[in-house]
C-alpha cells in the first residue's frame, strides 16, 4: 500500500519494461521514474532501443516484460488511441504530419477528442448549430496554439511547404493539442540549425510551465540535452547503463565509452 | 466620351464583382455548387420530361444509378484511401432486399411511392450493415489485401442471392409488380444524388471528415493523435454501402435484378468511373459516371449493325484515350492549352477581358488574383477576419 502512495508522486513510472521481437531482445529491465514537471532525457547510441521504448509507451508495441504507470494508472495493453486519451502524446522521429492538410487543420485534428468540442456524426451531417460553433471554437483554439509556436502566419499553408524546423514544431503543437500530461519528444532537434535548437530549448521549457507538462525526450544533440534535461537515462543495447542527474551521467565513464569508445592503453 | 464610358463600365464591373465576391464569401459557395447544378438539372428535366422519350428517361435513370455508385465508391477510395472492389455486392444487397421487401408489402400498401421509400430505407440499411461487416476486416487489412477481401465479398453476396430460391434463383427476382414508371423514377434517383452529396459534403467539412482525411494521410500519426481509426473506417464503409444500396433499390424498381448483373465487372466499371474522374474528386466522378454510362448505352445504337461487335473495343479505346489525356506527363502543355477552363474563358468572356488576362499572365500580378480566387472559393473562409488575411484552407479532400 505504501508503494501505491509513492507511485503518485511520479507522473510516469516504468517498471522492468522489456520487449523481444521473436527472440531479439530490443530492450530489457528498463526502470525509469519521472517526477511531475521534469524534463527527462533518454539518450544512447543508434539502435539502443530508445524509440522502441517510446513505441511501447504509446501502445504501438506490446511489451513482453514489465509494465508502466501514468499517474499510478497501469496503461500496458491499451490501444494507441486510448493511451493518447489517458494523456501521453508523442512526436515521431521521422516527421509524420498530415501532409495534405493546412497547418491549422493539423492542429485541429489534435483537438478532435477534446470533450469541449463534442459533435456527433448526425449533428455534423445535419449541420446543426453546434457543428458551426464547435468548428469555430476549434479553429480559435488551434490558432492560439500556433501562436505559441510562431506558426500563426503559416496557418493556411500546406504542411509539406513548411521548412523542416517548422514541421517539427507543428508536430509538437499537434501533440499538445491532445492536452497530454506527458509529452514524448522523439529527437525534436534533429535537422535544426543551432539557432533553432536554442529556440527549441526555450520553447520546451515554456510549454512545460505553461501547460503543466512533464517531458520525456530522446535526443542525440548533447548540447541540447545538457541544456534542457533535469535527469537523464542512458541506454545501450537495450539496457540502462547510467541514470541520474545530468552532471553525473555525462561524466560517467560507461557513457563516454558507449559514445566514443574505450581508451586505448598506449604509452 | 468613349474613354469615360469604358471607365464607368469598368467601375460598374468592379463594384459588381465585389458584391458577388461578398455574397459568395457569406454563403460559402463551394459546398453548394454541386447542389445548385443538380437542382437546375432536375428543374429542367421536370419541365421537359413530359416531352421526353422513354428511352431518354431510361438513360437518365441509368446515369443516376451510376452516379450514386461512383460517388459512394469515391468516398472509400478517394476520401478514406482504401481500395474496395466489392461495390456491386452492396448494390446487389440493396436491390434484392429492397425489392423483396417491396414485393412482400405490395398487397398491404397501395401507394407505389411509399413502397419505394420503404424499399429504399430497408435496402440502404441492409447494405450499410453489410458495409459494417466488411469494415471489420478492414481494421486488420490494408491496400491490396483489403481489395481482395472486398472482391471476395462481392462474389459471395452475388452467389448467395443466386442460389436462394426465395429471391428467384438463377433467373433473378421478378419485380414486374412493383416496377415504377421510369419517367418518375429517374427524378427520384437524382434527388437521392442530391441527398448523398449533401451528406457526404457535410461529413467531409466537419471534424469527422478532418479525422478521416488524417487517417488517409497517416494512419500511425492519427492513432497517436487519439483518433479512433477503426470506428471511422467502419463508418465510411457503412455510408458508402448505404448509398450503393440505394442505387440497387432504384435498379430493382426499373429492372428485374439478376445476380449476374452485379458481378465483378460491375464493380470494376464503377472503379473505372472513380479513377477516371480523379480520386477524391466528387465532381469528376459525377462527370465520368455520366460519360461512361452514356457511352455504354448509346455506342451500340450509333454503330451500324454489322459493326456492333466493335462496341467493346471502341469503349476501351475511348477509356484509354481519356486516361492518357488526363495523366500522360508529356501532354501537360497540350492539356494546359486546351483544358476546360480556357475553353470556358474563350466562350463566355468578352475579347477585351481575355486580352487583359493574357497580359497579366506574363506578370507576377497574377499571383494575388490567384489567392483571391482561393479566397472566394474556399470553404473555410473566416468571415470576421476577411479584412486582414483570409483563412484559406486547402485541406478537406
Image (cartoon, rainbow, N blue to C red):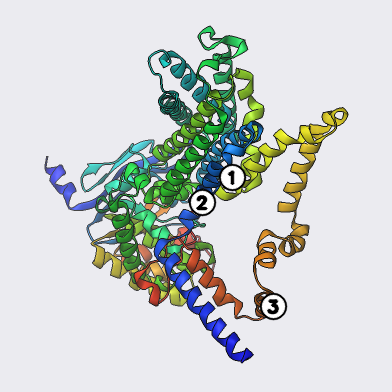
Give the Cα distance between marks 1 and 3: 33 Å
Mark 1, chain letter?
B
**Viewed as shown, does residue B274 lie left or right of A152?**
right
Query: Which residue is the site of mark 2?
Result: B34
Does the image show residue B295? Answer: yes
- The residue most toward the bottom is B1
Question: Any mark on residue B355, and which?
Answer: 3
Q: Quadrant of the N terminus of chain B?
A: bottom right
- Depth order, front residue of A247/A221: A221
Task: Pick whichever of labels 2 and 1 is earlier in the sequence.
Answer: 2
Residue B169 image position (x, y, % from top left): 58, 10
Badges 1 and 3, same chain: yes
Label 3 crowd bin: few (<14), some (14–19), many (20+), radius 10 Å: few
Q: Position of residue B100 (x, y in %)?
A: 47, 16
At 52% from the left and 35% from the top, the residue drawn is B189
In the picture as drawn, the residue positioned furthest to the right comes out as: B306
Q: Decide if residue B189 is on the left or right side of residue A235.
A: right
Q: Are marks 1 and 3 in contact (CB under 8 Å)?
A: no
- State left or right for residue B317 relative to residue B348: right
Looking at the rendered structure, whether the residues under marks 2 and 1 are on a common chain is answered as: yes
Amino acid at each position: 500500500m505504501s508503494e501505491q502512495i509513492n507511485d503518485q508522486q511520479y507522473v510516469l513510472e516504468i517498471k522492468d519494461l522489456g520487449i523481444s521481437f521473436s527472440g531479439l531482445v530490443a530492450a530489457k529491465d528498463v526502470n525509469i521514474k519521472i517526477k511531475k514537471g521534469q524534463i527527462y532525457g533518454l539518450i544512447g547510441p543508434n539502435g539502443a532501443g530508445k524509440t522502441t521504448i517510446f513505441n511501447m509507451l504509446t501502445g504501438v508495441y506490446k511489451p513482453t516484460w514489465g509494465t508502466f504507470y501514468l499517474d499510478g494508472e497501469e496503461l500496458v495493453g491499451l490501444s494507441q488511441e486510448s493511451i493518447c486519451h489517458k494523456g501521453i502524446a508523442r512526436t515521431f522521429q521521422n516527421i509524420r504530419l498530415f501532409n495534405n492538410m493546412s497547418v491549422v487543420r493539423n492542429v485541429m485534428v489534435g483537438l478532435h477528442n477534446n470533450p469541449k468540442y463534442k459533435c456527433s456524426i448526425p449533428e455534423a451531417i445535419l449541420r446543426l448549430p453546434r457543428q458551426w460553433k464547435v468548428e469555430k471554437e476549434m479553429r480559435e483554439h488551434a490558432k492560439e496554439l500556433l501562436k505559441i509556436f510562431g506558426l500563426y502566419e503559416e496557418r493556411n499553408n500546406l504542411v509539406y511547404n513548411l521548412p523542416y524546423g517548422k514541421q517539427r514544431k507543428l508536430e509538437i503543437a499537434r501533440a499538445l493539442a491532445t492536452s497530454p500530461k506527458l509529452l514524448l519528444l522523439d529527437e525534436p532537434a534533429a535537422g535544426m540549425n543551432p539557432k533553432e535548437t536554442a529556440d527549441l530549448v526555450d520553447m520546451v521549457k515554456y510549454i512545460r510551465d505553461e501547460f503543466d507538462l512533464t517531458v520525456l525526450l530522446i535526443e542525440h544533440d548533447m548540447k541540447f540535452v545538457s541544456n534542457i534535461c533535469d535527469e537523464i537515462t542512458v541506454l545501450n543495447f537495450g539496457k540502462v547503463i547510467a541514470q541520474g542527474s545530468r552532471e553525473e551521467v555525462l561524466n560517467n565513464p560507461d557513457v563516454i565509452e558507449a559514445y566514443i569508445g574505450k581508451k586505448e592503453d598506449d604509452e | 466620351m468613349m474613354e469615360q464610358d469604358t471607365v464607368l463600365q469598368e467601375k460598374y464591373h468592379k463594384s459588381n464583382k465585389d458584391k458577388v465576391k461578398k455574397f459568395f464569401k457569406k454563403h460559402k459557395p463551394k459546398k453548394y455548387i454541386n447542389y445548385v447544378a443538380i437542382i437546375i438539372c432536375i428543374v429542367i428535366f421536370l419541365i421537359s420530361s413530359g416531352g421526353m422519350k422513354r428511352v431518354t428517361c431510361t438513360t437518365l435513370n441509368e446515369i443516376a444509378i451510376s452516379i450514386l455508385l461512383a460517388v459512394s465508391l469515391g468516398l472509400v477510395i478517394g476520401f478514406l484511401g482504401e481500395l474496395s472492389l466489392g461495390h456491386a455486392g452492396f448494390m446487389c444487397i440493396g436491390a434484392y432486399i429492397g425489392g423483396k421487401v417491396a414485393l412482400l408489402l405490395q398487397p398491404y400498401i397501395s401507394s407505389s411511392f411509399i413502397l419505394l421509400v420503404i424499399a429504399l430505407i430497408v435496402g440502404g440499411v441492409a447494405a450499410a450493415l453489410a458495409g459494417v461487416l466488411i469494415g471489420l476486416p478492414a481494421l486488420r487489412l490494408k491496400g491490396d489485401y483489403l481489395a481482395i477481401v472486398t472482391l471476395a465479398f462481392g462474389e459471395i453476396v452475388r452467389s448467395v442471392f443466386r442460389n436462394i430460391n426465395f429471391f428467384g434463383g438463377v433467373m433473378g427476382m421478378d419485380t414486374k409488380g412493383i416496377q415504377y414508371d421510369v419517367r418518375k423514377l429517374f427524378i427520384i434517383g437524382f434527388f437521392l444524388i442530391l441527398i448523398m452529396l449533401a451528406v457526404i459534403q457535410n461529413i467531409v467539412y466537419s471534424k469527422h471528415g478532418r479525422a478521416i482525411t488524417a487517417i488517409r494521410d497517416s494512419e500511425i500519426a492519427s492513432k497517436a493523435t487519439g483518433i479512433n481509426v477503426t470506428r471511422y473506417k467502419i463508418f465510411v464503409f457503412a455510408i458508402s454501402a448505404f448509398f450503393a444500396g440505394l442505387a440497387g433499390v432504384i435498379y430493382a424498381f426499373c429492372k428485374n435484378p439478376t445476380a449476374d448483373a452485379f458481378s465483378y465487372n460491375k464493380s470494376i466499371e464503377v472503379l473505372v468511373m472513380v479513377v477516371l474522374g480523379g480520386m477524391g474528386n466528387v465532381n469528376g466522378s459525377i462527370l465520368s459516371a455520366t460519360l461512361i454510362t452514356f457511352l455504354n448505352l448509346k455506342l451500340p445504337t450509333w454503330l451500324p449493325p454489322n459493326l456492333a461487335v466493335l462496341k467493346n473495343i471502341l469503349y476501351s479505346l475511348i477509356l484509354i484515350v481519356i486516361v492518357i489525356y488526363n495523366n500522360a506527363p508529356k501532354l501537360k502543355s497540350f492539356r494546359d492549352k486546351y483544358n476546360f477552363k480556357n475553353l470556358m474563358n474563350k466562350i463566355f468572356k468578352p475579347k477585351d477581358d481575355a486580352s487583359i488576362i493574357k497580359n497579366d499572365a506574363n506578370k507576377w500580378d497574377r499571383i494575388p488574383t490567384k489567392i483571391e480566387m482561393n479566397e472566394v472559393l474556399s470553404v473555410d473562409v473566416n468571415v470576421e477576419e476577411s479584412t486582414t488575411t483570409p483563412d484559406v484552407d486547402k485541406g478537406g479532400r
